[in-house]
Image (cartoon, rainbow, N blue to C red):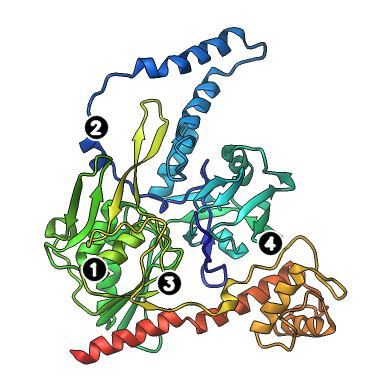
């Protein structure tokens, strides 16, 4: 998968749900009903499975060591899905299946994002869910985890790595991250992550604009969005901005209900193509949205972390609803997964279809182009400050260069291109410590690093170009009426 830049911690509080394959609730489209349409009772291809059966019997009968037969079967099943070379298809044993089910329904403990194996290293596959610990550490898509609590991940299975990352609420885990040419250490405190997927408020400067952030598409997101819109209307909203940035996707039934709200009945929401090339489409209807329509001016914000169901929503509103999509090209996940129980509490999450935009475009690994392009300032993409040691005058490294760039973004007189912790760096750090009522040592410890990152986060929010353009577009639309 091609390399993509993702907005870091400063703009969003990102989480990584540690299920056995580190996947958040929004990382796939639950598409069981369409999948079942294609299934028929088929005889077992016994000839094709004879080699598997023969190998199993040979190991059980003759292997000199102790054989865990359940583990042996799990390994074979995992091997089948891994052989597909599809990061979105997985065999889930019972604990992993339980974690996935929990991630879709209520709350969970962990840290939260889709993880896959790339070059034998666990890699964040796409934008994590909005809302908790990993964002505070600045984890982004394409980050590779090379150590967990000083233990190398190279050569370990994804399940083994995740079992190290998972843990009880309040406990800490240290991750060593590789991002491009940089390597840095992050400390994360595990927490309970509530799955509240929709948050809305009246824009602070524009009392008729309702700003709605949707973090993922879970079991109750349609109802949450409906309730939020009703509440914002009562508060004076006459137009809406739907923010899908860093939203990794979720459940198909929810995104279809939600998109239907903004479309006229009969307009296409999404098209599908199965293995045989057969196509079908789902359209807006009162059966989907229960007659609840949003006819007010609406714009949608997206970025490179908007994936899967987020892209379905944005494409539907762009191509069928003629709404403005503002931001950056989206992630590009154009496949559909189903989760099927294997009758023993294990499950398979399998890619079964392609989804297409209303105009029949397949955006997989390409992304959806926005109507209006708007990126964050360059400093939004700087790495978080490594927490592996205290930084002080005399140090020289890529970590210090990153620190200088962050300080420069905050307006301090430092050389953003320098890798040296200079006297200017020390003075800038001491000034930040004084402002935050910390001892003015001029050295960057964990608490000081948190303060610097929070200040940069505030500045990014203040310079949110996509949001500002969204406000202007809504004002234009309102003035036309």
SS assignment at label 2: loop
Name the image quarter holding residue 327: bottom left
Spot the residue most to the bottom. Answer: 479
Whole-percent x, y for residue 253 in the image? 26, 52
Mark 1 and mark 3: Cα distance apart in space: 17 Å
In the rendered view, tell whether residue 328 sits above or below residue 25: below
Spot the residue most to the front. Answer: 277
Mark 2 and mark 1: Cα distance apart in space: 31 Å
Q: Which mark is residue 39?
A: 2
* Residue under pointer 3: 328
Q: Earlier in the sequence, mark 2 or mark 1?
A: 2
Quadrant of the rendering where the C terminus is positioned: bottom left
Q: Which mark is residue 319?
A: 1
Q: Residues within 10 Å of mark 3 (few under 14, many from 20)?
A: many
Q: Earlier in the sequence, mark 1 or mark 4?
A: 4
SS assignment at label 4: loop
């Amino acid at each position: 998968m091609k390399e993509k830049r993702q907005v870091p911690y400063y703009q969003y509080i990102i989480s990584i749900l540690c299920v056995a394959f580190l996947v958040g609730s929004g990382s796939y489209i639950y598409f069981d009903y369409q999948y079942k349409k294609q299934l028929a009772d088929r005889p077992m291809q016994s000839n094709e499975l004879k080699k598997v059966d023969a190998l199993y019997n040979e190991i059980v009968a003759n292997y000199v060591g102790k054989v865990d037969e359940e583990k042996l079967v799990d390994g074979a099943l995992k091997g089948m899905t891994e052989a597909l070379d599809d990061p979105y298809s997985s065999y889930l044993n019972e604990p992993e299946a339980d974690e996935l089910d929990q991630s879709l329904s209520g709350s969970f403990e962990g840290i939260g994002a889709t993880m896959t194996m790339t070059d034998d290293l666990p890699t964040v596959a796409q934008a994590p869910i909005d809302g908790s610990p990993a964002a505070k550490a600045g984890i982004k898509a394409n980050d590779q985890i090379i150590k967990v609590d000083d233990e190398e991940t190279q050569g370990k299975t994804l399940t083994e790595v995740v079992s190290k990352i998972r843990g009880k609420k309040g406990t800490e885990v240290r991750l060593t991250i590789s991002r491009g040419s940089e390597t840095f250490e992050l400390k994360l405190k595990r927490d309970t992550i509530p799955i509240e997927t929709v948050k809305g408020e009246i824009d602070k400067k524009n009392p008729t604009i309702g700003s709605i952030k949707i973090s993922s598409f879970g079991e109750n997101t349609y109802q949450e969005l409906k309730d939020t819109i009703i509440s914002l209307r009562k508060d004076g909203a006459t137009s809406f901005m739907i923010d899908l940035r860093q939203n990794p996707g979720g459940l198909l039934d929810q995104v279809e209900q939600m998109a239907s709200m903004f479309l006229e009945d009969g307009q296409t929401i999404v098209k599908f193509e199965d293995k045989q090339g057969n196509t079908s489409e789902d359209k807006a209807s009162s059966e989907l949205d229960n007659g609840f329509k949003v006819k007010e001016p609406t714009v949608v914000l997206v970025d490179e972390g908007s994936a899967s169901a987020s892209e379905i929503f944005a494409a539907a509103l762009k191509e069928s609803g003629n709404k403005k999509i503002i931001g950056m090209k989206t992630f590009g996940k154009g496949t559909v997964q189903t989760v099927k129980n294997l009758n023993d509490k294990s499950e398979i999450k399998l890619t079964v279809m392609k989804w297409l935009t209303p105009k029949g475009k397949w955006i997989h690994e390409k992304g959806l182009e926005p109507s209006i392009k708007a990126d964050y300032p360059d400093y939004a993409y700087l790495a978080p400050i490594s927490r592996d040691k205290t930084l002080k005058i005399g140090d020289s490294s890529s970590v210090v260069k990153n620190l200088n760039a962050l300080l420069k973004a905050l307006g301090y007189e430092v050389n953003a291109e320098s890798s040296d912790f200079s006297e200017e760096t020390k003075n800038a750090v001491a000034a930040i410590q004084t402002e935050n009522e910390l001892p003015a040592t001029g050295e960057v410890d964990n608490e000081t690093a948190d303060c610097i990152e929070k200040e940069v986060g505030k500045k990014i929010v203040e310079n949110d170009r996509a949001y500002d353009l969204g406000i202007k577009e809504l004002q234009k639309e309102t003035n036309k009426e």
